[in-house]
Image (cartoon, grey):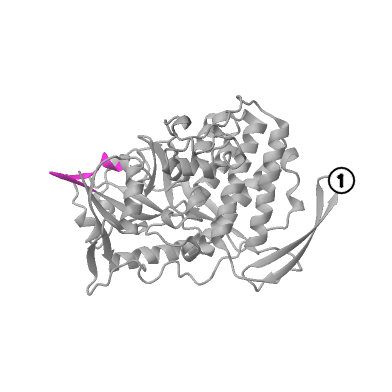
Amino acid sequence: TSSYHSHRVQVSTFPTTANPIFSTSTSSYHGHRGFQRASSFSPIFKREAVNPPELKTSDENARMWMKQAKADYLAAAFIFGRLKDSAVEQTHPCTVVEIDEEQVDGDERDVAVVCKPSASFPALVCFLCHEVAEKCMKGIMYAKCGMPAQLLECAHLITLNEFLEKSDIAVDLKQTVKECVLQVSEHHDKSRYPNFQIPPCAPAAVYSSTEENAAMNAVKKLMEYVAADSSLMPFVGDLQELPEVETIFQTNLQTHAEYPDNWAKQDGDFLLDLLDQQSSEFLAIESLFHQTLTRRIVRIERIQNRPLWCKYNDCSRRMMKTNEGKLGQKMLFHGTRTTNPEKIYKGSASFDMTFSQQGMWGKGNYFAVNASYSDTYAHRESPYEQMLLAYVLTGFSYTSHANSLLTRPPLRSGTVGDNTVQHQYDSINGCTLGSTVYITYENDKAYPAYLITYT
């Protein structure tokens, strides 16, 4: 799920005078977006900060936001621990860094690094990568096209990207930003809060070097573009001041356990397990569904199909090899229209391309961030309707305008050792009916995880 749909904030319509217990002061805490998150769950809160005026471009503000983006990038690089430095023990997966700071010329600092072996922290690295992207995008706005007041405190990368997409900045900068956003947008909450995982669990238990490598690669590419842009480089400075980050991809391709930990015990190859409506797993899916669709859920069933899971797992292993660790796994909705969902989740080919129809991006399997989009294509058997919630390997995804002639994604350049090779993108993405959609053109890049029945 995207950062935008995980962060939508409902502003309270209650006057603060009706709740005198709560302060209406505009402290720095109230200015923090964490307070906005609290108000979205507790409507009695109302933030009374004075909105800043509409802002145009500002070199001072651009420099300030880029400086923080650079600082967050430095922090992520240190925690990531893949530093090409003689002081770093490359045999250790991560290092703890002690920094000796000496002020020089007011702002510049000399930094001495002492590295010690430690555990890795992929969830924290992914969160910091989200912060790098957010601050860098705001720095670009101040430098290039102006910062709208309503976006100043916005942490939703997709919302920020939508503004940049409509601006007059360079097309290649838009594409670089978009690729970064698609990779790191979901990490703002999923990397920190157990309730944003499906099923709910500690992020530290599920984040791995796979997400960590992909996130670092994404922000590294964005920062390198900014540093090479003649109009942006004065704000971010020379990235050579930073230690070079070397992403090291794991050779063990155990991207998933043999079967997911949340699966119920089963005797055969298939089980449709009804979720308890009070369970955290049910409530997390219900919340995701209700973000864009206010319909009553009758039941949610977990689909446990061992042969299909093995095919999906094998596909993820192949992608790990060709994509240098990038899987881009997302949970997305899918409507089957006139096809009974049972043919997908009990069949041998999962999302079989033979069921696909010609769509806006050609004949493929379409998956949506918004449940409201998939509701348009829901399978209807009166009085109920059904849709699937699927794991989808979006990998390297190509953003495209509608093109009904597509039969597969275009080619992209990749590297194997010192050689440049051509690979296909793993999926296409675009926007329609108010939702981001992803299209795959292979059977095994998605697994039907849950069947949602609703009225």
Name the one closer to the observer, 194 or 23. 23
Residue 225 is one of the magenta-drawn residues: no
- Which span is picked out in magenta? 374-386
Spot occupied by residue 361 in the image (x, y as percentages of width and height): 36, 41
Residue at screen point 43% across, 38% down:
44
Question: In the rendered view, would you say 317 is above or below 442?
Answer: below
Which residue is farthest right?
105
Q: Is residue 415 left or right of residue 65?
A: left
Q: Which residue is mark 1?
A: 105
Quarter where residue 175 is shown: top right
How far from the left and from the top, in percent, is residue 306? 29, 68
Provide residue 149's location: percent of width, then percent of height: 58, 29
Q: Residue at x 44, y 64 (%)?
A: 318
Left or right? Give the position of 271 relative to 449: left
In the image, residue 332 sits, relative to residue 142, either above or below, namely below
Q: Amino acid at mark 1?
A: Asp
